[in-house]
Amino acid sequence: MELHRKTAHELLELHRKGEVSPVETVVSVLDRVRRVEGDVAAYLLVLDDAARRRAAELESADRNLPLYGVPVAVKDNICTKGTPTTCASKILKNFIPPYDAAVVERLRDAGAVIVGKTNMDEFAMGSSCENSGFHPTRNPWDLERVPGGSSGGSAAAVCADEAALALGSDTGGSIRQPASFCGVVGLKPTYGAVSRYGLVAFASSLDQIGPLAKDVHDAALMMNVIAVHDPRDSTSVNRPPADFLAGLDDGVRGVKLALVEEFLPEGTERGVRAAVEGAAAALEKSGAVVEKVSLPVLRYALPAYYLIAPAEASSNLARYDGVQYGRRAAQAGDLASLYGKTRREGFGAEVKRRIMLGAYALSAGYYDAYYLRALKVRALIVRDFGRAFEKYDALIGATSPTVSFKLGEKTADPLAMYLSDLCTIPVNLGGLPAVSVPCGLSGGLPVGLQIVGKPFDEGTVLRVARACEVSAGFERKVL
Amino acid sequence: MGVTSGYVRHIADLGRLDLSDEERETFASQLNDILEYAAMLNELDTEGVEPASHVVPLKNVFREDVVRESFPVEEVLSNAPDARGNFFCVPKIIEE
Amino acid sequence: MKYVPTIGIEVHAQLMTRSKLFCGCSTRFAAAPNHNTCPVCLGFPGVLPVLNRSAVEMVIKTALALNCEIPALSRFARKNYFYPDLPKAYQISQYELPIGRNGWLAVEAGGGTKRVRINRVHLEEDAGKLIHEGGDVSCVDYNRAGVPLMEIVTEADIENSEDAAAYLTSLRTLLMYIEVCDGNMEEGSLRCEPNVSLRPADADVRGTKTELKNLNSFKAVRRGLEYEIERQRGILESGGAVVQETRRWDEASQTTRPMRSKEEAHDYRYFPEPDLVPLEVGTEWQDELKKGLPEMPWEKKRRFMHATFNGYKISGGEYALPEEDADRLTSSRPLADYFEKIIKASPEETKIDVTREGAAAVRGDLEPQFIFPLYYKTVSNWVLNELLGALNESGKTIEECPIKPEDFAKLLDLIRQKKISGRIAKDVFKEMFATGKNPEDIVGERDLTQTTDVSEILKVVRRVIEANPGPVSDYRAGKKKALGFLMGQAMKETKGKADPVIVSRILREFLEGT
Ligand SMILES: [Mg+2]
Ligand SMILES: [Zn+2]
């Protein structure tokens, strides 16, 4: 097998034994990028020279580093010191952070090689990667289709073997939905498990960084590196370090799973439903207890999310005004046009729409009716998740009601696009860990099973995902 | 109810977004759709529910009052669209 | 119609932390532009705030000193508006859950004590500084951005500019006492934004208020409010209506002028700051901070003063000083400390309580001014007149005072022991202030020891009497004022070294022929 095709844990073993050097691996992946990037367009920036240099440096480093010589792609809303970080927005086109995100520091310390910065929906707002301010990314399974979003570039890069592992961010499903669309594993950790320091904020109370991986083992490997307390993020929870690889293959005998009706909502494609129910049956066969339950309050997660997330975003994105950094409009003769024109030219339509939606939800006279009510609904969602977890170890369902859709199919109708995240959004409101693992195909396109766990119980979520992976026998796409 | 094009102008102003008349119309109709959808939240009884602005189980997270070296001024200014003499610059503002 | 002003005051006090509120940048004043900045206080993408513990504790201490309720849970909120001095386009502040609320401060004004109610005390970050000098651009310096500010808001309890100034004076003293703010109004460490409205004396409804800015001294606060009250009165009396607006005090013209609004639409869209977690200020933490609070200025003043009972002075306080002295000495904690250090270094004899032990304590040739409580008044006089005068003249603060309190006590003891005269002591004081030398050395070097030798003084007096027959006969003719002149001549003859008590006694004996 060619090196670029291998998983991170396979590469690690080869590197450790000295059978393959990090340089060979990185060269193989960079060659692969050169060959397929014209079709997939997963990256906004490929760090060709830097990656080769880093791989060469690693020749003399400790081979037992947890990601020794593993080529990793990083979503472009995660800051990389001295390397442009644009959030796929024109407004940050030339922005070069003078600092690394906490997770990037962790990657570097772990011996990973950063291959490039991946494409995304602008400021992580979108579910198809079509809202990138620069270019769309295509789904390696079908180049006419979207890779999902917003971490579509990271999912596509892993899927197309343009990186062994990738980092994405998930505010309402932005890791899990593209993982589902591209047939890879995507994990959104518990809120507070991974430092947000250096992650360009979309909705601060919902954002989490997590891995996109070729298999469950690799996702756990990445978690071991990035899920560490960081005093620079006040919402980072200080817990004893966990080994996410431990017990991964222990199976699901006796594990209590709830197949949640609201995770197979009205409008779920028949093939998706079949694949998810098939996976549930397989888990049952492996010894898990699976019961069907309904959590009706989850129906209200999407509208609550589309008030809370834009409200926070409208404030988080106010700083892009062309004063300290970023792109300033040319015709900014006075303060009003400095702001108005810079932001008009710099932001795409979806970003503008959400800034306005957020400003509306927070504005005098509407705060109580919209924003505050949404926070109360969020409290109800947290409460009902808590009740469900008194009975079950994990909740399962579809990651997305559909498989990947065609480019341009949903761009004219924002609400239709938002519905793509119906099953993932409640998890962010609850701050819970969840993984999407490929569980089958529908019309030749991958379907993801979503597994949601208790706070900080990534262990169970990964173990169930691993069991699903084993029983599904899913074959990754060869482009 | 519904968001008028006039109110769209107000919230676009709050967000400092210059919009064309056409964009205002489009956004007004799209925002209306979304807010209409959001109105389903009213179906739930939220009486007495404590709003959850956050789910993280933390309180009192501090740093100690210790001075750390600031960033070199060239570095903080390196991304600025207009910097002169160690200042960030904006078009002249007439204050008062 | 008669109109009554209603004044509320909002104060922003810069907290004396070493580092900023959410990052490790220094709060040092006047560093070169943008040298005290980092990605956090510049609002760069992706970076996050982490709260400075000391800043929170300073606000809790203030809230405790202002008798506030401290809610169990407090939260930060974002106040959203665009301006180039605000890097993130929102200010991290507090909104519905401030650290302290519903407190009060006792203020002495107009001969009585009034309670000014405190609506809230909260913590927030400062903005940067805009400079508009010359050129076609405005320049921004973010050194101040993110410096911790405490906002203290009163209820509209204040009825005139005098009381407003009295409130500010008390508040400033308090903040400096508990060491949370340096109180410097010119440098902007303490900013005062009063709002004022007028209502008809017989009505209960409040009028339209205006807010005043750019008041950089107590005098400006008083003048600004007075001007604004008269301006509003003029409008109302001529049948007009006051416009709700922010007005800027112009020092040059001594008037207020409307400010152009920063934000056309004042809709700050406050919401809970998601990057910070809530504050829980439990009673244990409060008690710990309460223990660390110093004696409050009003407590210290009471201790320094005489007490009164049914209108009679009694020696209640520790030093039994007149109210004015106590007020001035306790107006600053270092000054009060300095005073007390002199007392502490003074000999035991000065601490005999004449009012308790009776006149028997006054014996020998001990001057009453060196016995309690008069000794304390003597020290107070020296500190308030000589010392403050000298400090003022040299532009030094009490902390930079070149005279050690122990040396000050020695100087006064030299007078008590009649080693030098009061007049000479003033010269010695000047030299001590200029050189920092101790008084004994100065007196020794310059041979200033007081003459108490009666035969020596007798000679001098005789010479003065002979040389001034005019005043002598004036005195004998009943013009007692002439004694002063003759005294002066005699002291001059001895270069001030003679004991004036002895000189006066001998002179009188001569003149009255006894
Ligand atoms: Mg304020
Ligand atoms: Zn800073």
Image: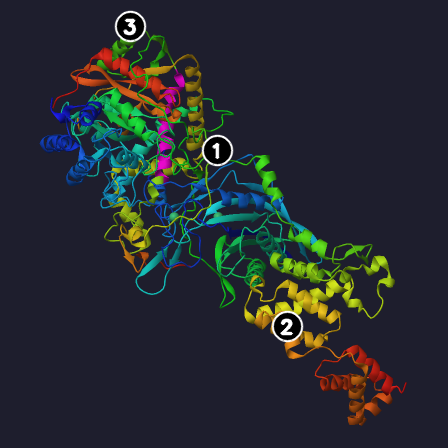
Residue at image point 38% right, 28% down: A191
Work out whether disc 2 and disc 3 sit on a shared chain: no
Quadrant of residue A148 within the rendered picture: top left
- Say which element carries label 1: loop
Task: From this view, report whether residue C244 is shown above or below residue C80.
Answer: below
Name the residue carrying label 3: A285
Looking at the picture, tell me which residue is in the foreground, A326 or C155: A326
Kindly tell me whether residue C7 is visible in this rendering: yes
* Residue A309 part of the magenta segment: yes
Instruction: Tell me the kind of residue under disc 2.
Output: Asp
Indicate the amino acid at tag 1: Lys
Q: Quadrant of the C terminus of chain B?
A: bottom left
Which region of the structure is painted magenta? A295-315
Q: Position of residue A322 (x, y in %)?
A: 29, 49
Residue under numbered circle 2: C441
Callouts 2 and 1 on one subunit: no
Ligand 2 within 8 Å of the CB at mark 2: no
- Residues at marks 2 and 3, CA–CA distance in whole angstroms: 101 Å
* Marks 3, 1 in one chain: no
- Foreground of the two, A150 or B2: A150
Q: Dividing the picture into quarters, in which one does residue C434 lie?
A: bottom right
Q: Secondary structure at mark 3?
A: helix
Percent of width and height locating residue A34: 10, 33
Q: Is residue A337 visible?
A: no
Q: Give the chain letter at badge 3.
A: A
Which of the two discs, 2 and 1, sits closer to the camera?
2
Tell me where residue A176 appears, x and y as whole percent: 27, 24
The N terminus of chain B - image quarter:
top left
Mark 2 neighbour class, 10 Å CA radius: few under 14, some 14 to 19, many 20 or more: few
Colour setting = rainbow
How much space separates mark 2 and mark 1, taking CA atoms? 61 Å
